[in-house]
Image (cartoon, rainbow, N blue to C red):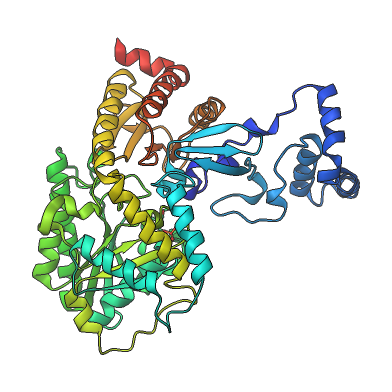
Amino acid sequence: MMVGMGCHVRPGCSIRSRYRGTVQHHGERKQAVKQEAGRWNLASHNARLRRLSSNRKAQPMCWRRVRRVETIPRMSPERDSVLHSWCVPAEWNAPTVVGGRGSRLLLEDGRELLDMSSLVECSNLGHQHPRLIAAIREQAERLSFVTSAWGAEPRRALAERLLELSGFEGGLVFFTLGGADANENAVRISRLASGKGRGLVVTRDRSYHGASYMDMALSGDSRTAHQVDAAAWGVRHVPPPYSYRCPFGSGSPHACGQKAAAAVADCIDTEGAERVAAVLMESNAGSNGIVAPDSYWPMLRELTSERGVLLIADEVMSAFGRCGEWFAWQRHGEQGRPDIMTLAKGLTGAALPLGAVVMSAAIARCIEHQMFYGGLTYCGHPLCCAAGLAALDIYREEELIERSRKLGASLFAELRKLQSRHSVIGEVRGGHGLFAVVELVADPATRAPLAPWPQQTDTQRAMLRAALDQGVSFGSRGNLLIIAPPLVIGETDLSAAISLLDRLLTRFFPVIGLEKKA
Ligand SMILES: Cc1ncc(COP(=O)(O)O)c(C=O)c1O
C-alpha cells in the first residue's frame, strides 16, 4: 500500500523493485558483490546476517532486510541511517539523486529522470537553476545567518516584494521554515487579530495542511486523523467541494461548489460567528487533488466577510505559477482576496526551506501592539530569503507564470483527450496552470475508485514503475496521478511524457481502454 502524501514520486516507498535488480545474472552479481564489498562492508553485513539467522524467528523483519542488502549490493544504503518521511522505513529503497538540470534529475548510476511532479510540487523553477544557486552562494558569502532579533536585508526586501505582488501593501509577512508552520502561525495570527482567544478554525475534509500536530488537526486527512483530536485543537471540518464525488449529491460542479461553501456558512452559524476565528482552505491545488469549482472560493470570501470571520488561503502548493497566477486566489480578482495567505514550496523554487504568512494591512494593524509569541530559530533565514528574492526575479523575468498558464491549458486539453480514450480515467481536474489531477477509476459508470483512498492497486504501482524505467517520474497519491512538472519544462518533454502516459495506460489498463473505445 502506498503510504505517504509526500510519497508521490517516491521510488523509495512504492517503486522499489525497479532498483533492486540492477545486477541480473548470478556471475555478474558475484562480481559486483566483490567490487562493492569495500563500500558496503560486506563482511560486516554477512556477520550481521549470521547473527540474525541464528535468531531468525525473533527478528523476522530485520532478517528480511539484511538478506536483501546482502543479495543486492547496489541498493542505496541510506535507509540504514535515515528515517525518511511518509514511508515504511523497512520498505524505503530509492536511488540517490546526485544532480539536476531544468526538469531533469540525475541519478547516481548516470540515468536521467524527467520530473513530472516537481518532486512534491515544489521545484517550480526546475532543478539547480543557475541564478538561484548563484544568489544563494552570494548571500552565503555576505551573511549566512542572523536571527530575526536583527534586521537582514534580503528578509526585508522579500517581504516588500511579496506584499507588492499580492496587493497586500501595508500588511506584514511572517517568515517560517515551511508550509506546516506557516499554517500554524496563520491560525495563531488570526486568533490574535480577531481577539477570539482560542477561536475555532473551519477546514475541509480531505485537505492537507502539513504534518505537525496542529496541522494534522487542521487537515482532513484520513491517514493522520487518528493521531490527533481535531476538536481539542479547536478545528471543525466541513465536507469538501469535490464535485466528481459531490458529498451533497449535486449534479453540477457549480452547484456542488455552492453547497460546499454553504456548508461552511452553516458550520459558522451553528458554532456562532463570535467563536470562529478563521476559515482555512486550499484555494486551488492541494495534496489531496481536489480542485474546487469556480463558484466556491468567491462565495467563501463573501460568507466569511459577512460573518466577521477571517479567511486564510493555504497557497503552499498553489502559488508561484503552479495554478497560472502568482497566487491562485488571484484568478477570482478582488472577490477572491483572503485576509491571510500561507506560502512555501515554490517561494524559493524549493532550493532552500522557507515559508511565509502574508497578512493584510487590516490584520497587521490589529496585531501591531500585541505580543506575538511565535517563531523558530531559523525563521526569516537570510540565505532562504535571498533564494526567495532570486526565485521571484526568475518567475518574472522568464515569464514563468504566463508560461504555466499557457502550457497548463494545453496539458489539460491533452489529458482530456486521454480521458476520451481510456475509461480508467474518471476525471481530469485543474488546467489553470501546470497542475492537473487525473483520477483513476475501476468503473467509470459507478465512479468506483481504482482503490479506496488513499491506497493504490498493484497495477497502478507497476505503471508508475514502468514510467520510471522509461525515464519519467510521475507523481501519484492514492488513485490520483498528479501532473505538475517544473514550469520550465520543455514543450517536447511535456508532450513526450503525455504520450508515454497514453501508452502506459493502454498497456496496464487495456480492457478498460478497449471498452471505452467500443
Ligand atoms: C496545501 C499544502 N499546505 C501545507 C503543506 C505543508 O507544507 P510543508 O511540507 O512545507 O510543511 C503542503 C505540503 O504538501 C501542502 O500541499
Return the residue nearer the eye: 155 or 35: 155
Q: In the picture provided, is 250 more to the left or to the right than 244? A: left
* Relative height, residue 432 to residue 143 (above, below): above
Percent of width and height locating residue 83: 63, 56
What's the residue at 23%, 43% (across, down)? Answer: 246
Q: In the picture provided, is 183 more to the left or to the right than 55? A: left
Percent of width and height locating residue 247: 24, 47
The image quadrant in which ligand 1 is located: bottom left
- Total numbered labels: 0
Quarter of the picture containing the C terminus is top left
* Relative height, residue 213 to residue 428 (above, below): below
Q: Residue furthest top?
A: 518
Percent of width and height locating residue 7: 51, 46
Residue 317 shows in the view: yes
Report which quarter residue 99 is drawn in: top right
Return the residue nearer the eye: 341 or 303: 341
Quarter of the picture containing the N terminus is top right
Return the residue nearer the eye: 464 or 440: 464
What's the residue at 27%, 20% (across, down)? Answer: 420
What's the residue at 19%, 64% (across, down)? Answer: 338
Report which quarter residue 496 is drawn in: top left
What's the residue at 45%, 67% (across, down)? Answer: 177
* Relative height, residue 420 to residue 214 (above, below): above
Residue 195 shows in the view: no
Percent of width and height locating residue 325: 23, 49
* Relative height, residue 236 to residue 465 (above, below): below
